[in-house]
Amino acid sequence: MTMWSDPATPVDQVELRFGEGQDTKLLQNFSGATRYRDSLFLAADERCGIDRLSLEGGIWADHHCFQLSSLLDLADPDDEADLEGLAVDDGWLWIVGSHARTRPKLGKKNEDCIDLDELADLNDTRPRCLLARIPLKQQGRQWLPIHQDGKRRSGLVRQTKRGNALSKQLRKDPLLAPFTRIPAKEGGIDVEGVAVLGSRVALGLRGPVIRTHAVLLEMEIVGKKSGSLELVGPIAKRLLDLEGLGIRDLKRCGDDLLILAGPTVGLSGPCAIYRWVGWAQDPVQHEQRVRLHRPEHLIDLPFGRGVDHPEGLALWPTKDNAILVVCDSPSVERLDTARKVLKADLFKLPP
C-alpha cells in the first residue's frame, strides 16, 4: 500500500507583524496570499477587504486594510465576500470569492441541540460571487490597490440577483450543476485560488472532486473601458489527478502552475504542492473531450488536527525556489496573540 510521504520541513519561518490592537480573529482566517515585490497581500475568508504588509528592513509589518467597497462596485458591500484567492498579473491585483453556498454558523449555540430548520436555511451566494481585478500603483517601495490609475479602472464580473456570469454558467453545466445546490463544506462548488496570464484566467475548485479528479476552471476574461469584466465564451473544465485532493490555491510561476491541494470538506488531512509544468503553453483543446492532467507532486506539507490548515501560497523570490505557505486556523505555536504576529512557513521546492 502506498503511503503519504513524510511532510517537508520548512527552511525558514516568516513573521507577519500586524501590530498591537489588531483583531486576533483576522490572523486566524487567512485564505489567500500573493507577493508583489515588497508588498504582501492577504485575503481573509470572513472579511470584505484586502490586507497588505510591507517589507522594511527585513521585517514584514506596516499593516493596512483596503475595504473592497471603496475599490469595487459591490452589490452587497457590507456582506462577507469569502475571499479565497489572490494573484498579480501585469500590475493588476486579481481577487476571487468562493462562489459557494453555506449553512448558518451555529458554533456559538449549544451544539448538543441544533435547530434543523435553521440549519437547512442556506445562505445567499451573491456576496461570494466575486471575481475582480484592481490596479496596483507604486507608492514609494510599496504597491497600493486603487480604484483608478489613469485609464486603468478596477472592475468585476457584474453581480446579479443570483450571482454573476460565472455562477450562471456553473448552474447550467451538466457536470457541475448538481454541486451548485450543495454547501461548500459538504462537497459543493467552492472556488479557491486564481491564476492569470493575460486574458486567460484559471480558478481552482476545492470542491467538488469528481471521481477523485480535481477540477480547474479556465475562461477568457476581458476588461471594458469602464473597468467591468466580461466572460468571453464558455467556461472550460480541466481534470487533474491530485490523488483525491481538491485545489486550495494556485500560483503561476513563469510558464508553470503551482497547485496547493488539500481535503475537500472541513477536515484535517493530507496537503501537498503540485506543479503543472508548461501550463502556459497547454491551453484548453476541447470543451468536452478532456485529458486527465497529472501535475508533478513536489512536496507534502505538515498539517495539524483542527489547526494549521495550509490555505495560501506566495512566491518568495528572495530565496531560491522557495514558496511561502500561509495557514488558516493557526496553532498557538504559530500565532502570538499579544504581539499580533502570525508565522508562515517557507518551503524549498525541487528545481
Image (cartoon, rainbow, N blue to C red):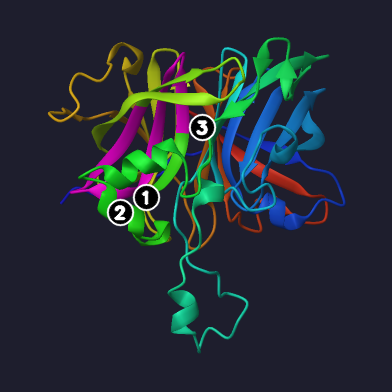
CA distance separating discs 3 and 1: 18 Å
Determine whether, in the image, residue 192 is placed left or right of residue 213: right
Question: Label 1 crowding class (10 Å Cα cut-off): few <14, some 14-19, many 20+?
Answer: many
Q: SS class of the residue under badge 3?
A: loop
Q: SS class of the residue under badge 2?
A: helix
Q: What residue type is labelled 2?
A: Phe
Q: Which mark is residue 157?
A: 3
Mark 3 or 2, closer to the camera:
3
Main SS category, magenta section: strand
Residue at the disc numbered 2: 179
Residue 213 among magenta residues:
yes
Q: Which amino acid does label 3 sit on?
A: Val
* Residue stretch rendered in magenta on the structure: 194-218
Q: Which picture quadrant has residue 215?
A: top left
* 350 or 240, nearer to the observer: 240
Determine whether, in the image, residue 117 is placed left or right of residue 140: left
Question: Label 2 crowding class (10 Å Cα cut-off): few <14, some 14-19, many 20+?
Answer: many
Q: What residue type is labelled 1?
A: Ile
